[in-house]
Image (cartoon, rainbow, N blue to C red):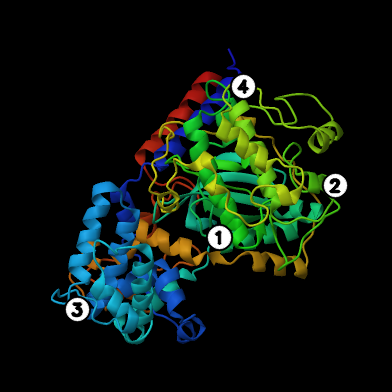
Amino acid sequence: LEPADDDLVGLDNLVANTAYLRAQQVDYDELRKRRVSLTLPKPKNSSGLLLDRKYESVCEQQPIGRKLFQEFLLASNPQYVAAAEFPEELSHWRFAEDEAREKAKRSILAKFCQPESKSFLSYLTGEAAEICKNLSNKNFDEEALEQIKEATRDFLRGKPFLEFMKSPFFYRFLQWKEYEKQKITNKYFYEFRTLGKGGFGEVCAVQVKYTGQMYACKKLDKSRLKKKGGERFALLEKQILEKVNSLFIVNLAYSYNDKTHLCLVMDLMNGGDLKFHIYELGERGIRMERLIYYTAQITTGILHLHSMDVVYRDMKPENVLLDAKGQCRLSDLGLAVELPKGRTICQKVSAGTTGYMAPEILKQENYRISVDWWALGCSIYEMVAARLPFKDFREKVHNEEVTRRTLEDECKFEHKNFDDPTKDLISRFLRKKQLHRLGSRGEDPRSHRFFQSINFHRLEAGLVEPPWVPKSNVVYARNTDEFRDNSEVENIKFDAKDEKFFNEFSTGAVSVRWQKEMIDSGVFDELNDPKLNGHGCESVWTSRIWTGGGGREGDGIQQGAAGQTRALGRCSRDSASIHGSPALPTNRAPSNWIFINIFLNAFSCKQWWRS
């Protein structure tokens, strides 16, 4: 008997899901084998000239610069050590709670505010020095500590920063900046299952070969983009994502292009979207504890966008994704737009999704940030009632009628789970007039009593435990066969203008995200200390410096020449020992026996069924 097509499709989905889940279980021994020949390049002469050498950029905004500057300070005199340790302990005090907070306060007073202490902040002068000497349990407050912190910052950006830029630590920073500029191609990643499809392409899961970091890759079909005139929106989304560095927004890590697609590599959110959680998991709707937590994170994400003069314009549960830890983030900034300074915007074509669009969009009036707060009010309502304020779940109704209801009807709170704080918050977000709407005049909606259980300082630091965490053995995405197959767009030819656009789009690694990945994955420590990966006892400042030769273009890994590698006490390794079995495609799953067995077993089953 011939097997049903559904059985074969189901097997394909099982194989794809198993490989995808297995990839998320990081094998650190395998990773170390893959990156054993990684080396740092010598900085080119132009690198230092092109680098932004401001203290804020090098030592505060860039994770590797901040880490190396910290190491430089801790390896220097006691005054520099104290200046490095004080901000860290102050941050610990700010985010601590109860007994831990009291203990942190006592430590700061004893360690940094007593003249006889070896860590006394002796570099302080003027008013800051007096505040520090007189600090005690009675006057230990945020304002006094902030003055000391700012004085410490002023001190660090002076002589310590100048000395840092003349040190081997800064040379190492230049090496990392040179490495950061490597060309990104498909060979930099392993590719896994499709997670979703849209009008311009698909989203699939990918893994960086030598860090093990999982991401989602949004592939935009070049031909489809050109046919539909979507290039400007794709570039705008990419440019906005590049500027964002927020725990509450899906961040961009890499952008590049191949022969057929523009690729945006972003944070992988494998906990599903809120629409899925509202309608597909158990009883429809989201319980109050999760509602408050998610709304707090969404509100903070919207505020982060507004602080950059960006209007989201597509706030809805479907665009709010959960990560593996249960934190939620805003995604899909395809409709986002940057606001002109001090001006409003108005478009003839409505931007947004039916049921979430504010009255001013529907009436084609000028607006700024007010539209996002309206859409958030609709989304909170939906999370509680499993329906929109002006449209029932799966109700068949024309868009014109939804528009009429939005403009004329008042919101009704008929669901049993609406409590007074929730109703009041939603009502304030759903006021028809922009100026009367909560958040529209610059006030912070997070001061509303609905959020009284949330510590926003800890929330923004990622220290508040989520009320729900996704299961690590579940794929919160539709089966691979359920995604519509986008037919190929034919007879589209690209000219010099198109190629210029593709190159403008493809800027490689996003600095802050890439540096954080290097640190979190352990690559930073391994390349700075060769002893961690079996490279002998070379000096941290002279070992594994790339001097040319032996590199393979496009694979994201620069390998020293054989002679140089031997000088580090190692034999040269070929690409297969790093990237896995040569039998597997270079941009597919890594050489792990479980993957090989999965695919071989799946192939055998198909052959047996057909026989």
Label 1: element kind: loop
The residues tagged by marks 2 and 1 sit, at their Cα atoms, a distance apart of: 31 Å
User: In x, y percent, where is residue 188?
Assistant: 48, 58
User: In x, y percent, where is residue 385?
Assistant: 62, 26
Q: Residue furthest left?
A: 116
Residue with the mark numbered 4: 5
Q: Nearer the viewer, residue 292 or 282?
A: 292
Q: For the residue marked with disc 2, what is the amino acid?
A: Lys
The residues tagged by marks 3 and 2 sit, at their Cα atoms, a distance apart of: 64 Å
Mark 3 or 1: in front is 3
Q: Residues within 10 Å of mark 4 (few under 14, many from 20)?
A: few
Q: Earlier in the sequence, mark 4 or mark 1?
A: 4
Label 4: element kind: helix
Q: For the residue marked with disc 4, what is the amino acid?
A: Asp
Residue with the mark numbered 2: 363
Whether 264 is drawn above or below 110: the answer is above
Whether 181 is drawn above or below 470: the answer is below
The residues tagged by marks 3 and 1 sit, at their Cα atoms, a distance apart of: 36 Å
Residue with the mark numbered 1: 244
- The residue that appears at 69% across and 61% down in the rendered structure is 236
The residues tagged by marks 4 and 1 sit, at their Cα atoms, a distance apart of: 44 Å
Residue with the mark numbered 3: 78
Query: Do residues under tags 3 and 4 come within 8 Å of each other at their CB atoms?
Result: no
Give the quadrant of residue 431: top right
Q: Earlier in the sequence, mark 2 or mark 4?
A: 4
Q: Residues within 10 Å of mark 1 (few under 14, many from 20)?
A: some
